[in-house]
Image (tube, rainbow, N blue to C red):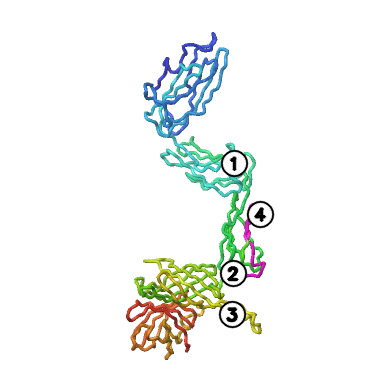
């Protein structure tokens, strides 16, 4: 439907009541729509155009948009954003007298995606020279047209930069056919000089910029995504290929001040800002003699492994440097100290006894691995308590430790272990391990002053772990030579706290001397038994079963300190026949 003011006829010409500013040869002021659609597809743009005749000042028109619905005594309702928007009005003079005055006025209309209510809009053009001269056009908002959007346009990119995946979104495409992709510069194909497109998909494509900066116009290509369903609908990404204007900078993100010799390797990471080609860094260690090694080098990381022994100054303070590949003048570095190896390092076995204020008893044995840098990455633990905690066997543990030097020069280690895979409840233990000093002569004929200060390989355990008051022993493990076959025919004495060691009286297999009082066995039981030892795992743990002369059986977790010494903890539930005990078995003789 169309609504006109004044005289109604097909050309929609309005005649002014007076010919303002006209001479004797100038006709009346009139306005004519030269583009007037019945409907505008939702989400699209349409350019409305009117021609003004006999406007001697050529001032053109003013456009207004309203809903075709009466309100407040008017024939229309003022529009909101639901109607769409007008913008970009222009006025072009096509004839300027003496008797003919003509101008063309255009305005861009952006239609909403969804139609307003009611779906009838009125566009009014009013002559600026005479407000009484108007013309209107009534139109509707049609079904949305296919719309294409490149959602992550590049805009600027550097030569040699990593490939970029562009994504397209196609709206109101009932066929969901996606888009086709093209790359051109000023309308002409330009690949590979302006870059390349690859792995084209209906909704994505990979753009790779050229390795070097191209000359114009190839330095400003355009990527076009065109709807497959409606080939007249496209979106464009106008790209500028240019060298980065920001300087490269390098940062090492995890430097350290000190590392112990003989410790585990550390991965060092770097970040390079404005490295458009992603070339990363090269790594160097200076001085390189006796200072460790760099390995597993990557553009942004490297593995540093310290030497087994600390070098003498100045090599004990090396520098690691990361230098940009794209700009070798840009780098970052740090200097660190290689300290002597932590004496608490390697594999240790321990045995513990404890009690709480309620009289409950506990016993434990286990092993741990210290990395020389305060971490315990692996370990194993067996705990037997007479309270509700009961028995926890073969618990994988990890933790950390702190080293302190006592006033007498001995070394105190605070150890904390936690279950790495808690089941019904988490199992953990904390204790102090004290290692006294020992002295080692420098060699044959050395003077009394020529010796090295060392720490003993065995120590005493004390401390408080929750409600438990603990005591026990800890010793460095040497399990490389421990094999079950090597222990056959050995005679051990078994000491369970409080310990009373009996001499063994028979040999062959595993023969143990049992302390009658501390074993929990009836007093009539003789203190002789035979044992069988299960397979030894990587932590030095095995299962020991003792069969006594009275046919009573005891089960223990055995942690090998060496082929001559085992730390034990009872695995039987504490009762009248079995005490919650721990201790050690020490070889007395070996007969083969």
The residue that label 3 is drawn on is: 439
Which is more foreground, mark 4 or mark 1? 4
| 4 vs 3, front mark | 3
- Counting residues from the start of the chain, the first of labels 2 and 4 encountered is 2
Residue under pointer 1: 240
Q: Position of residue 212 (x, y in %)?
A: 63, 47
Discs 2/1, front:
2
Which residue corresponds to mark 4?
328
Q: CA distance from mark 2 to mark 1?
A: 52 Å
Q: Which residues are magenta?
A: 307-334
Quadrant of image for the N terminus: top left
Q: Look at the image and say whether residue 326 sits in the magenta stretch.
A: yes
Residue extending furthest front? 407
Q: Position of residue 420 (x, y in %)?
A: 44, 66
The residue lying toward the viewer, choosing from 102 and 462, is 462
On the image, the x and y values in percent for residue 460 come to: 49, 77
């Amino acid at each position: 439907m169309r609504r006109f003011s004044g005289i109604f006829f097909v050309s929609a010409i309005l005649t002014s009541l007076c010919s303002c500013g006209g001479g004797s040869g100038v006709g009346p002021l009139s306005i004519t729509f030269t583009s007037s659609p019945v409907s505008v597809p939702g989400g699209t743009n349409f350019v409305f155009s009117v021609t003004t005749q006999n406007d001697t000042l050529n001032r053109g028109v003013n456009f207004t948009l309203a809903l075709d619905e009466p309100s407040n005594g008017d024939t229309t309702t003022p529009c909101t954003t639901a109607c769409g928007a007008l913008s970009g009005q222009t006025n072009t003079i096509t004839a300027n007298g003496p008797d003919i005055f003509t101008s063309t006025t255009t305005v861009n209309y952006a239609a909403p995606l969804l139609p307003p209510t009611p779906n009838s809009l009125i566009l009014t053009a009013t002559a600026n020279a005479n407000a009484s001269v108007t013309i209107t056009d009534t139109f509707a908002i049609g079904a949305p047209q296919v719309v294409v959007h490149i959602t992550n346009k590049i805009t600027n990119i550097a030569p040699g930069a990593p490939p970029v995946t562009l994504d397209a979104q196609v709206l109101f495409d009932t066929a969901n056919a996606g888009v086709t992709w093209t790359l051109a510069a000023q309308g002409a194909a330009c690949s590979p000089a302006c870059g390349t497109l690859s792995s084209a998909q209906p909704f994505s494509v990979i753009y790779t910029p050229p390795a070097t900066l191209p000359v114009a116009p190839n330095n400003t290509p355009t990527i076009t995504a065109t709807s497959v369903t409606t080939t007249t609908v496209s979106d464009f990404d106008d790209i500028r290929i240019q060298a980065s204007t920001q300087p490269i900078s390098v940062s090492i993100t995890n430097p350290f001040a000190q590392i112990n010799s003989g410790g585990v390797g550390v991965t060092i990471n770097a970040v390079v800002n404005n490295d458009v080609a992603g070339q990363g860094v090269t790594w160097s260690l200076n001085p390189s003699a006796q200072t460790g090694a760099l390995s597993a080098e990557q553009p942004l990381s490297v593995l540093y492994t310290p030497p087994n022994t600390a070098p003498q100054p100045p090599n004990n303070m090396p520098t690691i440097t990361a230098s940009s590949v794209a700009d070798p003048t840009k780098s970052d570095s740090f200097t660190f100290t290689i300290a002597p190896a932590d004496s608490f390092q390697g594999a240790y076995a321990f045995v513990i006894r404890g009690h709480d204020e309620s009289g409950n008893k506990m016993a434990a044995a286990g092993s741990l691995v210290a990395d020389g840098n305060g971490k315990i990455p692996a370990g194993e633990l067996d705990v037997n308590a007479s309270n509700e905690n009961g028995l926890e066997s073969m618990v994988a543990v990890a933790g950390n430790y702190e080293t302190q030097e006592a006033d007498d020069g001995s070394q105190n280690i605070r150890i904390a272990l936690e279950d790495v895979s808690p089941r019904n409840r988490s199992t953990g233990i904390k204790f102090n391990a004290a290692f006294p000093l020992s002295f080692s002569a420098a060699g044959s004929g050395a003077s009394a002053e020529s010796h090295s200060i060392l720490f003993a390989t065995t120590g005493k355990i004390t401390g408080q772990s929750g409600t438990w008051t603990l005591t026990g022993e800890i010793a460095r493990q040497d399990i490389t030579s421990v094999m079950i076959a090597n222990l056959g025919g050995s005679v051990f004495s078994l000491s369970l706290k409080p310990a009373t060691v009996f001499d063994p009286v028979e040999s062959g297999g595993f023969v143990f001397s049992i302390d009658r009082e501390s074993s929990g066995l009836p007093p009539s039981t003789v203190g002789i038994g035979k044992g069988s030892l299960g397979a030894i795992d990587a932590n030095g743990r095995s299962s020991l079963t003792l069969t006594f002369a009275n046919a009573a059986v005891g089960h223990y977790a055995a942690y090998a300190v060496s082929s001559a010494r085992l730390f034990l903890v009872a695995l039987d539930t504490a009762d009248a026949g079995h005490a919650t005990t721990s201790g050690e078995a020490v070889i007395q003789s070996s007969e083969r």
